[in-house]
Image (spheres, rainbow, N blue to C red):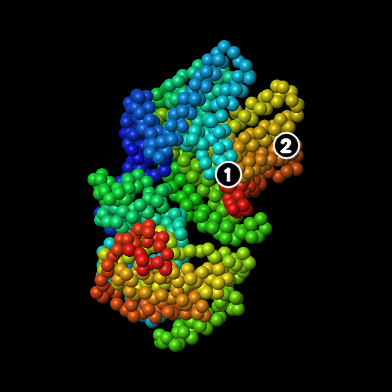
Amino acid sequence: MFKKLWHIFGPVLVAALGLMVLLLSPLRFGRPSAKTLSTAATSMSANVIKGEAIKDAAFDANYIPVIGSSELSRMDPLHPSVMATKYNWQNKPFLIGAPGTQSLTHFLSLQASGNHLNGKKAVVIVSPQWFVPKGVKANMFDFFYSPLQTSYFLLHAKNTAATRYTATRILQLTSDTTSGVVRDALKNKALGLPLTQPQKVYIANVKRPALQHQDQLFSQLFIHGREKFVQKGIQKLPAQADDVQLNTVATTLGQQATGDNPFGIKDDFYKKRVLPHEAQLKGVQRNFNYESSPEFADFQLMLTYFAEHKMDVQFVIPPVNARWASYTGLSQGMLNRFDQKVRYQLQSQGFNHITDMTEDGNQPYFMQDTIHLGWRGWLKVDQALKPFMATKKAGKVKYDINNDFLSRAWQNVGGDQVEDFD
Amino acid sequence: MPNLQPYANPTYFLILGAALIPLIIGFLNGKRWHFYETLVSLIFLILIFDGDKIEQGYALIGYVLFEGALIWGYTVYRQKKNSTLLFNLAVVLAIMPLVIVKFVPFLNPGSNSIIGFLGISYLTFKAVGMIMETRDGSIKKFEPWLFLQFMLFFPTISSGPIDRYRRFKKDYLKIPDRDHYIEMLGKAVHNLMLGFVYKFILGYFFGTLLLPRLAHLAMASRGGFLDLSWGVVGYMYVYSLYLFFDFAGYSLFAIGTSYIMGVETPINFNKPFASPNIKEFWNRWHMTLSFWFRDYIYMRLVFFLMKHKVTKNRVLIANLGYLTLFLLMGFWHGLTWYYIAYGLFHAIWIILTDVWLRFKKKHKDQIISNRWTNYLAIFATFNTVCFSFLIFSGFLDKLWFH
């Protein structure tokens, strides 16, 4: 009988044992190679965003996180990743973001880097489009939601206003993804309670090691870098990084790509995405509002992280294509008030490296399409990033973090009333 | 207590494995511990229906009490009399909760009936089956304890396979001999492992990784004739494969778990995509459901029409049977145009298949039939089935109307 039973259950037991070793052992698998890092740096892949191993290794090497969203994928020759390759920047951009990533996703990804970013630098491209009245969409947040990063958060976050706010937000946005012990632990964090002993033991010894090993083993597979664009791009750039020459190249490339469509945007984008519905699009953005949004509080979480880890951060605020804005009725006044509000949030807390391009929406060949930076827009970003990224170490920084920026009152305050906000 | 949906994650399988070990030891020693079995069932039912699913749990209790009382009452009545009217009434009452659950979201989009719970349609099949067999006289008395064990048998509660009362009872009361049980264990492990491959690898690949991309592609390339594009074609095949691997995987888990518990729950899928025609397909796809419809709807309707001499045309009778069967199946899936269109599509297809099969039989000598025509038939059937699943998926609804 036992022989027969062994024939049935033996293979299962052996496999289970193997799996346990693979997932729960204290071993560490597969340190990412330099090649993996350089691929991952331009991949913008969800696996990379949701993981830890690759980013941690990249930040220990000579990569500086460039945090953003869809604009990062607009890889024309003036894109910082191409520029950094062509002109051998000491530190290379590590792109973190994809269409749909916003502040909360970025904060969770940052905090899971723990001390790997201590005293280092980062770049954040702040899209006005993140700051819609309802904030990040639950399905988008869910798509980039990382149980691994949440496990780090649960084990490390101290009981602060930011922590309680974060836990509440995760619970609001991922009713399906998190469940059981993790969900209960998040509820504790949201209430300001410590994790219970069983929660801690389970998350620290079962959940997190299993997720870490999966991350180490699998997140390096299936990532596709944008090396092709980089290689194509560097051939178009002048030998010397001379601003006048670069501006000429950017202008010429912009001219070639935009043709004569009414918005001065990339022609294939215009033909595919705008032209078929052009008539319906007139005036549709009349009531768009980026001034009051939970995103302002989510954004504050990132600032809290930067301050805690004494990081030096370069912020970029891109414009909206002005011709597009006036056609769709998007209010430049509203954009200016958004800009005022976000700058107040940054500057009043000591974040002073801001490349503010809000007023540049009418510059020719600045935007590749309606809301995404292109040629001359990227060039302006490059001009700020080149000196900033020359060193990886942050200089002396002094921040004065104010938790009122997490409040509902701040989320709703108008951009022209920020001075009265207290 | 945590909430665990059946066969959804590793935790579920770990708890399941641990809970079943004592049962295995018992069976190997020739013992069947009904008490412990019941305890395990109870714990798993609580795990499925606790926490934020507690309302469903109450609905389940209410439902089982209602169906139990109904079947009990009908059995007592049937021992004395046998009126068709009362039988019809009993069946109508038995399906009433399901009908309500299906109608509420139809009348009031976005809301769900409070009497609904995960698995209500499968329990309704079991209950209606019992009433019909009581009418036939195959079930003679109502055994409350066995009724509960049958209805609430946790491995199959949420999505089948749909067992039959008398078959279940036989297994439940018997102790398999050791050699046979060891064989059952072997099958159980095989089913569970194959289930992992189906549901968590292939189902995941098709359903979670590929399907959203194709949906996105199809939605992005709308605008052509009927909004069709390669994205829609891809969606059709990927959805069909996802549906199969997900559901077949689920059935394999349910069957594997049943076997360990000494119950030989019938299989649900038998290489359906290798069917050379649609009739054969329904003998291989979601078999316990199609056999249920065949035995309790189709056969009975055919018998009724013949007995009452509604028509003597056998072909017409069979066709009416198919039409009823598949329309009912469509309605059972839900009150939306695409489920009903799916039912109608299959009814028409199977009627046409019958026409062809009769023609083929008559002209045996003129029609080539060899290995290659068989492959061709399999290929054509597979593609048509996939098309019907595209209707079934509801994606066309999204594509055209949203």
Q: Is residue A302 left or right of residue B382?
A: left
Quadrant, the N terminus of chain A: top left
The answer to the question of whether label 2 and label 1 lie on touching residues, with beta carbons closer than 8 A, is no
**Amino acid identity at mark 2:** Arg
Crowdedness of circle 2 by 10 Å Cα count: few (<14), some, many (20+)? few
Q: Is residue B148 left or right of residue B26?
A: right
Q: Which residue is mark 2?
A: B358
**Residue extending furthest front?**
A420
Residue at image coords 42%, 43%: B8
**Disc 2 element:** helix
x and y percentages locating residue B221 in the rendered image: 60, 61
x and y percentages locating residue A413 in the rendered image: 40, 62
Q: Where B381 sits versus A50, above or below?
A: above
> Which chain is indicated by disc 2?
B
Q: Nearer the viewer, residue A23 or A361?
A: A361
Q: Nearer the viewer, residue A223 or A394?
A: A394
Give the alpha-carbon distance from disc 2 to disc 1, as whole Å.
Answer: 22 Å
The tag earlier along the polypeptide, 2 or 1, is 1
User: Residue A263: which quarter of the image?
Assistant: bottom right
**Disc 1 element:** helix
Q: Which residue is mark 1?
A: B274
x and y percentages locating residue A347 in the rendered image: 33, 71
Q: Nearer the viewer, residue B181 or B155?
A: B155
Residue at image coords 57%, 47%: B393
Crowdedness of circle 1 by 10 Å Cα count: few (<14), some, many (20+)? some
Q: Is residue B313 visible?
A: yes
Residue at image coords 47%, 25%: B65
**Amino acid identity at mark 1:** Ala
Q: Where A408 sits versus B247, above or below?
A: below
x and y percentages locating residue A10 in the rendered image: 33, 41
